[in-house]
Amino acid sequence: MLRTKIISGKLLELQREIQGYADEFGLDYFPQVFEVCDYDTINILAAQGGFPIRYPHWKFGMDYDQLSKGYRFGIQKIYEMVINTNPCYAYLLEVNNWLDQKLVMAHVYGHNDFFKNNMWFGNTNRNMMDVMANHGTKIRRYMEKYGHDRVELFIDKVLSLENLIDVNNLFETNEVIQSRREKEKQASIEAENDGYVMDDRSQALKSFMNTKKKDNDAPVEQSTGPEPMMAEQNTAKGEKDILKFLIENAPLEEWEADIIGCLREEAYYFLPQRMTKIMNEGWASYWHSSILTQRALDPNEFIDFADKHAGVMVMSKQNINPYKVGIELMRDIEYRWNTGRFGKDYNECPSMHDKENWNTNLGLGREKIFEVRKSHNDITFLEEFLTPEFCNRQQIFTYKYNPRSARMEIDTRDFEAIKQKLLTQLTNFGSPLIQVEDSNYKNRKELLLKHVHGGVDLDMQFADATMRNLYAIWKRPVNLATTYEDKEVVFNFNGNELKAL
Amino acid sequence: MDHPIKRDHSRFRKIVKGKVRENLRKYVSQGQQIIPKGTDKFTVPMPSIDIPRFRFGDQSQGGAGQGQGEQGDPVAGEPGENGEPGQGEAGEGEGNKELEVEMNIDELAKILGDELELPNIEPKGKSQIASTVDKYTSIGTVGPDSLKHLKRTYKQALKRQMSMGIYDPSNPKVVPIRHDYRYRSADTKIEMENSAVVIYMMDVSGSMGEEQKEIVRTESFWINLWLKSQYKNIEVRYIIHDATAKEVDEDVFFKTRESGGTLISSAFKLCKHIIETDYNPDEWNIYPFHFSDGDNWSADDTKLCLSLMDDYLLPNSNMFCYGQVESRYGSGQFYKDLSAKYGTESDSVILSKIKDKDAILDSIKDFLGKGK
């Protein structure tokens, strides 16, 4: 099965050379391992999110289908794959030409530094390769035991809820995670021993007696009642980590809870990458560009490099190219902090001429971007550093659907509108914000979720299908409170059809 | 051993084809056909399954892009199309779903063949049509410099020098003279080729609407494409009919709209006539295709059609294909009549019902899947 091999010979020499430049520029990275492989292997790896072993599921087959067709039809080609592990593994395509390999290596050192230092990645598991393989083994075993179709069907349902996680959980420290694990274990043991019927009754009774004092009751309940199930029921309101909520509260068999646990762990692992796409790619591109143009390129490679680089940076009218916006914003920050173009004095300077020629020779640019890569994610990155001048220079616009012409049209180039649009798109990693509102809705053990409406309606067709999947796990009717077409509405799925209440 | 992802892959292919997990098939994105756009550009949609999630309705959402343009200028394409170029990186990302590709007909036919798992056609009979091909397989004493054969020229010069006794082994210099030069020259060969004729017949009576014709047009495009990749020499003839039949060119075939009754036998008679006059069945692979909405004037005429098929069309063609396009007005009777007589598994009479545009690929597979 080993389809990749560690680089040797000239490539290894090249790695040493590039690593030397990375050190010189002050990049701080995990030990870097490069392996080469053929295009089929890199397509497989890419389809599996960069990992050699995953659990069996058709979605990996689907991604592989698309990637390999894309390659065969000559539409797309993956040069490189890098994953957030320690040591950091990266895969090179063996047919890449020399310049590609140079570029890719430099780019990878950028990603590696970002993985290691960006604080959103701080709690990601750097042994994910093993964890993924273990999940694969577990799920394969469950398939042998309970049947392939049955387990796959369940995984489909969980994947449908995969984005219902809480970004704040990325900052749980190890201790917090530890105590949560124990809680989960205890909960699952209890669920097994007593069954949820018991709990169901006590819950029903309790809320019957305390309907009005429910919220006030919570802290008391937590301190006196050692039963985590009871505590959970009351504190569930506002829970955004719906996968966790289900593990703890849904009537699941042990293997089902375990699978949700696996998939949840993987979802959290990938979450920081979704939250820092622009920064991560911008940072890596900044470094491949700097390392190559200032150090690694032979004179005869400049034109080819410029061509390659331009290909990666191509602007699109349909969406923001994270490579382009990322690198340009990094450079803009570096320039502003080199020349002192920030802060009260600069912002409130009344003279356009002075502003235009502002330069305090501050020279803090490099230092600033290292700091930025450490503490920001895409949202805060754009929130803090996007400027009207930048948007203007980068020709950014917003577009929207025009129902009269039935097409997407350029809407505006107004700075505030652009910023608003970009931030909205990035909020909650691009997923609607959904939280638990009541786990015993109408005192009927129904689930009530709340969509925190940020201006954009849900796709109800998808919501319908998702709620069906949720129903299959919760096993009682599922409700969703949202705003749809400017009306507040609660949708109810009772096992047969989705209805607005 | 193959990588485990191949199992995931074949599982996915089975789901897409609806062989397993019927419940998932409804999420398979629509429009699996390759759509011709202009002459050599095609959109190749990748089949994909959307895992349902809570997500934003995207029509109202819009997005942000980069580039020139004034307010109100269209933003071509849909958001999400054309994924990012260049390096990929670990993590989640939306795959490209529809890709626009420029490719030539041969490549396209190959993709079609791969996608539908079409077998290559084994031509019937012997290759009968002679064509001449020039192949540079022989050597001549005259020719242009560009075809000079250096090795043979050298050999000739060496032979001459040795027989004349002027070759000196200690100073092995070989100088060719005018007479020694040799050139590659062409042999003309006669090659026998397989030829095929496709005869399309379509009912253009009032009940066949625009949508039905569009289906026939798309379907015939793909059938032609595939047969062209299989036969070097292919001719296509078109017949339209209502109560009477006439031969027309391609343009008229797809545009005509007549009204009136339907006598399918009229088309079959004309088809027979065309074969008799122009295509000797011993030399040609003959493919009659008939498309209609299944209405025929009378049971008597249907009887006449069946006897025409039995007596002449079937024995003389590779296979006879009937595609029934669903229409609001059509009764679909003809399909029933044919399947009653020949069954749905017959090798010589292939029947296919084409419900809508999405069924075109399945129907092409019905027609061409036999390899005849």
Image (tube, coloured by chain):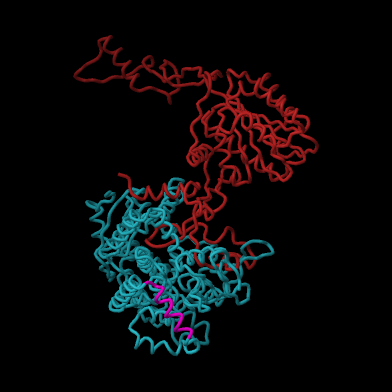
Q: Is residue A102 visible?
A: no
Q: Residue placed at 55% from the left, 28% from the top?
A: B347
Quadrant where the C terminus of chain A is found in the figure? bottom right
B142 vs A446, nearest the viewer: A446
Q: Main secondary structure of the magenta part?
A: helix
Q: Is residue B220 visible?
A: yes
Q: Which chain is cyan?
A: A
Above or below for A290 versus A357:
above
Was residue B174 drawn as part of the magenta stretch in this picture?
A: no
Q: Is A231 displayed left or right of B100 in the figure?
A: left
Q: Within the image, what quadrant is residue B289 found in?
A: top right
Q: Residue B91 at what x, y percent from top left?
A: 39, 62
**Furthest residue toward right:** B260
A463 vs A413, nearest the viewer: A463
Q: Residue placed at 58% from the left, 74% from the top?
A: A490
Q: Residue A386 at what x, y percent from top left?
A: 48, 76
The magenta span reads: A195-208
Q: What is the drawing colour of chain B?
A: red
A17 vs B304, nearest the viewer: B304
Q: Residue A75 at what x, y percent from top left?
A: 46, 50
Q: Residue B253 at what x, y percent from top left?
A: 71, 36
